[in-house]
Image (spheres, rainbow, N blue to C red):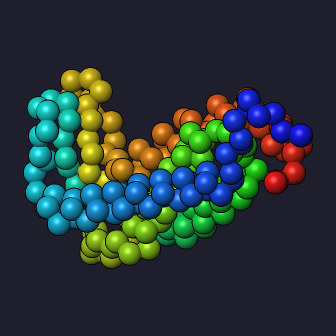
């Protein structure tokens, strides 16, 4: 018998819809801003938004985070494979998360969107570098965390990935055992 004073549990489908909406909105913003950067910042000087601190500056990353494995032939297929595995895992995770945690569903949506946004670039964006056509990811946000100390360029997909992991990881560390023991409903 259900308790009439206790609110009904949210339906899993509504939480999965929340994650899907986050994916669509975040991926759209990421792809739009990268297309804008490709058209307006490539071959241009950095655009100062806040002088000495925040700039829009085109860069083309043929590696992963912080340019790791940039220019390596194995990098592109490796990162595309890891991205697809991540998206599949995150989609499967949506089936086991408790529906009472909408922020966690939104975090999974951000991770999926960030992964897909950067995968899109790795599949379709190519630039001639050193006489060779190379695929990579458009980065265009440049922040100086100290005077004359810039953080490596990044993009909306990177921000979504970091924010999603920052929300999801503590949740999984605290409640991961429960997910492993509970069958999907």
Quadrant (top left/top right/bottom left/bottom right) for the N terminus: top right
Q: Give the x, y percent position of residue 141.
A: 27, 45
Residue 69 in sight here: no
* Quarter of the image where one finds residue 60: bottom left
11 left or right of 69 in image: right
Q: Nearer the viewer, residue 72 or 94?
A: 94
Name the residue rendered at 64%, 31% in the picture.
170
Q: Residue furthest front?
A: 4
180 left or right of 36 in image: right
Q: Give the x, y percent position of residue 131.
A: 27, 75
Q: Give the x, y percent position of residue 14.
A: 61, 54
Q: Is residue 81 above or below residue 19?
A: below
Q: Give the x, y percent position of residue 51.
A: 11, 32
Q: Is residue 154 above or below residue 41?
A: above
Q: Nearer the viewer, residue 98 or 41?
A: 98
* Quarter of the image where one finds residue 58: bottom left
Q: Nearer the viewer, residue 166 or 71?
A: 166
56 left or right of 45 in image: right
Name the residue rendered at 14%, 61% in the picture.
40
Q: Is residue 7 above or below residue 84?
A: above
Name the residue rendered at 54%, 35% in the picture.
166
Quadrant (top left/top right/bottom left/bottom right) for the C terminus: bottom right
Name the residue rendered at 20%, 30% in the picture.
53
* Quarter of the image where one finds residue 99: top right
Q: How many marks?
A: 0
Residue 148 in sight here: yes
Q: Nearer the viewer, residue 157 or 47?
A: 157
């Amino acid at each position: 018998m259900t308790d009439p004073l206790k609110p009904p549990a949210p339906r899993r489908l509504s939480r999965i819809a929340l994650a899907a909406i986050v994916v669509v909105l975040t991926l759209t913003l990421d792809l739009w801003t990268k297309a804008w950067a490709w058209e307006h910042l490539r071959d241009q000087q950095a655009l100062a938004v806040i002088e000495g601190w925040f700039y829009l500056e085109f860069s083309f990353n043929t590696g992963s985070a912080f340019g790791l494995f940039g220019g390596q032939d194995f990098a592109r297929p490796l990162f595309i494979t890891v991205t697809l595995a991540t998206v599949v895992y995150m989609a499967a995770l949506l089936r086991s998360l408790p529906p009472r945690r909408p922020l966690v569903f939104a975090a999974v949506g951000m991770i999926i969107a960030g992964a897909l946004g950067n995968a899109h670039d790795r599949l379709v964006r190519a630039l001639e570098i050193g006489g060779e056509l190379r695929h990579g990811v458009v980065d265009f946000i440049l922040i100086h965390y100290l005077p004359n100390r810039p953080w490596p360029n990044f993009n909306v997909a990177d921000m979504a990935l970091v924010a999603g992991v920052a929300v999801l990881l503590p949740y999984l560390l605290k409640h991961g055992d429960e997910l492993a023991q509970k069958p999907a409903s």
